[in-house]
Image: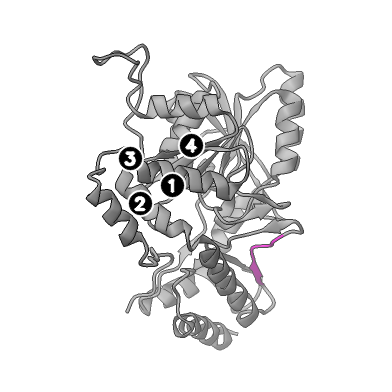
Amino acid sequence: MRIYLSKPHMDGSEQGFVAEAFQSNFIAPLGPQLDAFEAVMADYLGGGLHCVGLSSGSAALHLGLRLVGVGAGDEVWISSMTFAGGIFPVLYLGATPVFFDLDPSSWTLSCDLIEEELARANRENRLPKAIVPTDLYGQSADITRLEALCQRYGVALVVDSAESLGGAFDGRKCGSGGDLAILSFNGNKIITTSGGGMLVSRSENIADQARFLATQARDPAPHYEHSTYGYNYRLSNICAAIGLGQMQVLDQRVEARRAVFFKYKQALARPGLSFMPEPEGVFSSHWLTALSFDPQTPGLDREAVRLALLAEEIEARPLWKPMHLQPLFDGARYVGRGVDAALFSTGLCLPSGSDMSMDEQDEVIGHITTLLDGAG
């Protein structure tokens, strides 16, 4: 049986919430399950937050960028190593992405580079409209430092926490930082609504604007009245019902994925293999287990490992290909030293599902160990 990188993990309680939605006939986009899901998430993330359930994480980012004023010609500074869905909304708005490298000590957005470039841009009167850090593979960027930098220069901070629900930075839940944050509940995420996302804000007014724009921007009237354009972006009530069940087991899902990560780290420990670092003050959900193979160490070959696992019906994937290396963004401005490019060429994500059995993880470890020991 194929071992997947990260597949949906249902608890069983989801069916009860979905049944309630069907019994009450709330199968349209809005309903009590959606209201409850938003409230449960706001409570989980911390006090004073407002959550808006949306059709995807990309939809949440699109709305978030529009709501902080990003428009045609504006610059958005953004992590280069991320999924394309975390970049495309910048293009939807006609803005220009500027890509930034990672910090080698955390494998998340380099705050040193951001600070240096903000000071330079301020002197040259060309500050960006927004900064979008990606919480990579379940781990938060240094949200405390980024918030301080953005406040100093008057730049909006929209945190892409699509991959990091369940993690924390200095005790603050991932998804609760910045001016706005976004979450994803895609099928491969740590919890899923089959497809979906969420916009998180401390501003009730921003949340209300998001709901308005996400429901086709219909002005209050007995007929269809529109003073601006909107989107069909609301999360369905049925999907939200699945989310309610998933929220009941979120902490267990995080615990399971962290256990998977640390078992890999212990079993595969050897010179030249480096697992994603977890700096002091960071609590990663380890949505995916990410590691790097030193190409200068004899016997270590990332691609050989990936292909050997694939031959055994085990899914493993390289780390995200940085956006500044993608054909779509050929010629885009990049600020960095190539940390992300190096990690892409040497990095691998191993199967990390919260429902992985011990036997499945032992199988993955066994194949990798056999290959590396034989090559060494």
| Secondary structure under the numbered disc 1 in the rendered image | helix
Q: Is residue 210 left or right of residue 229?
A: right
- Amino acid identity at mark 1: Phe
Choose the circle earlier in sequence order: 2 or 4.
2
Nearer to us in this view, 230 or 52: 52
Residue at the image position 64 percent from the left and 45 percent from the top: 101
Q: Earlier in the sequence, mark 1 or mark 2?
A: 1
Callout 3 touching callout 1 (CB < 8 Å): no
Marks 2/4: CA distance? Answer: 42 Å
> Residue tagged by mark 2?
241
Q: Quadrant of the C terminus?
A: bottom right
Q: CB of mark 1 within 8 Å of CB of mark 2? A: yes
Q: Tell me how many marks there are.
A: 4
Question: Left of 262 or right of it: where is 218?
Answer: left
Q: Is residue 371 visible?
A: yes
What is the span of residues highlighted in magenta in the rendered image?
273-278
Mark 4 or mark 3, which has the lower sequence index? 3
Secondary structure beneath disc 3?
loop
Q: Which residue is mark 1?
A: 37
Q: Earlier in the sequence, mark 3 or mark 1?
A: 3
Is 250 drawn above or below residue 29 in the view shown? below
Q: Specify few, some or many for label 4: CA neighbours under 10 Å numbering under 14, 14-19, or 20 or more.
A: few
* Label 4 SS: loop
Q: How is the image coloured?
A: one colour
Disc 3 target residue = 31
User: Which residue is labeled 4 in the image?
Assistant: 330
Residue 307 in picture, x, y percent from top left: 42, 73
Indicate the quadrant where residue 132 lies. top right
